[in-house]
Amino acid sequence: MDLLDTLVSKGLRRELPTREEALAVLSGSDEDLLDVVAAAGRVRRQWFGRRVKLNYLVNLKSGLCPEDCSYCSQRLGSKAEILKYTWLKPEQAAASAKAGVAGGAKRVCLVASGRGPTDRDVERVADTISAIKAENEDVEICACLGLLSDGQATRLREAGVHAYNHNLNTSEDTYADICSTHDFKDRVDTVQQAQAAGLSACSGLIAGMGESDADLVDVVFALRALNPDSVPVNFLIPIEGTPLAKEWSLTPQRCLRILAMVRFVCPDIEVRLAGGREVHLRSMQPLALHLVNSIFLGDYLTTEGQNGQADLDMIADAGFTVEGTDEKTMPEDRAEAGDDLAAVGAPAGGRQDLVSVRRRGTGTDLPPNA
Ligand code: SF4
């Protein structure tokens, strides 16, 4: 049986591939790329049909973070010209969330910069959730507030939070290369705290930070071991003013292979195409829908995504459907169980023309993009 047949067969049985098989997905040639996409697409359709879940980001607090994550425009010492503001009022956040829900988002992700919330911050978020739910009772709320302290996950669940996001981002071995103010274990602990409190865990990665294939496989296996319900896959947006601004190493082909590998390792888990989709996949975005079953609608935390209507058109044109609030995301029994730049024509120094710092939506007077 060849590699792709083996991976499909395992994916259809929810069986973990070996590390060698996962590595082989990353290292093939462009010649067989469509075969890889088709194989992972079979696994995607088995567990998620042709549904695409839409998620909408609301940045409750932007910039001014004391942590030093090198990929992040909100980090300590960042010179990125992003919007900076402190906590949005509940009604401001609710107005933004409403735009996302109107655009088809099933989940609203409430994000705040910082190492982690104070208990007072958690109460602010609780007030924000009440304001959002007053208008959109059925919307799923995911909170992403950083490292959690004792009792905070339980308080968030009581306030109506459905899921908690905290990404592992990169492998344990390379974590110290991207951040010195907290470590990999801190992140794992927070994911586990959220799960222990009964929250659905959302934890993912960022590719394109100079990591090796082995690092990518390591972080995806570490994620799988945590058994999250959703895995966001970000592709680094190299924002001017951050230490990784010159790190333009991804190609659309590489991104598709990474997404296929994540799908094979996490066959029945929500795999979400997150930041960097437009910047790195570019015209290949629709192919990625055969691998992931979830995307963000509209803008990201500090950068602009493509127009929300373009996202909806892309989904329809590729033959997929937006997942409704009455449709389950997770497969039934899982829910019960609890290159080179020249090669792609990119100019030396990267494609900063593709990166637009967010100037609309929350924290501005301009309407949100959804
Ligand atoms: S990723 Fe989060 S913790 Fe790290 S610098 Fe950015 S906002 Fe701060």
Image (spheres, rainbow, N blue to C red):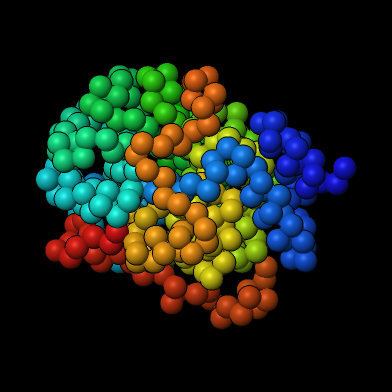
Residue depicted at x 41% and y 37%:
327
Against 254, is 108 above or below?
above
Q: Is residue 47 left or right of residue 190?
A: right
Residue 183 at x, y percent in the picture = 49, 36
Residue 56 at x, y percent in the picture = 33, 49
The quadrant of the image that shows the N terminus is top right
Asked whether residue 297 is in view, the answer is yes
Q: Of 159 and 210, which appears nearest the observer?
A: 159
Q: Is residue 253 left or right of residue 175?
A: right
Q: Is residue 146 left or right of residue 184?
A: left
Residue 157 at x, y percent in the picture = 29, 24
Residue depicted at x 37% and y 47%:
55
Against 107, is 212 above or below?
below
Residue depicted at x 85% and y 46%:
2
Residue depicted at x 41% and y 45%:
323
Against 360, is 189 above or below?
above
Q: Of 248 and 31, which appears nearest the observer?
A: 31
Q: Of 258 and 66, which appears nearest the observer?
A: 258
* Badge count: 0
Asked whether residue 175 is in view, the answer is no
Name which quarter of the figure residue 17 lies in. Answer: top right
The quadrant of the image that shows the C terminus is bottom left
Residue 281 at x, y percent in the picture = 54, 65
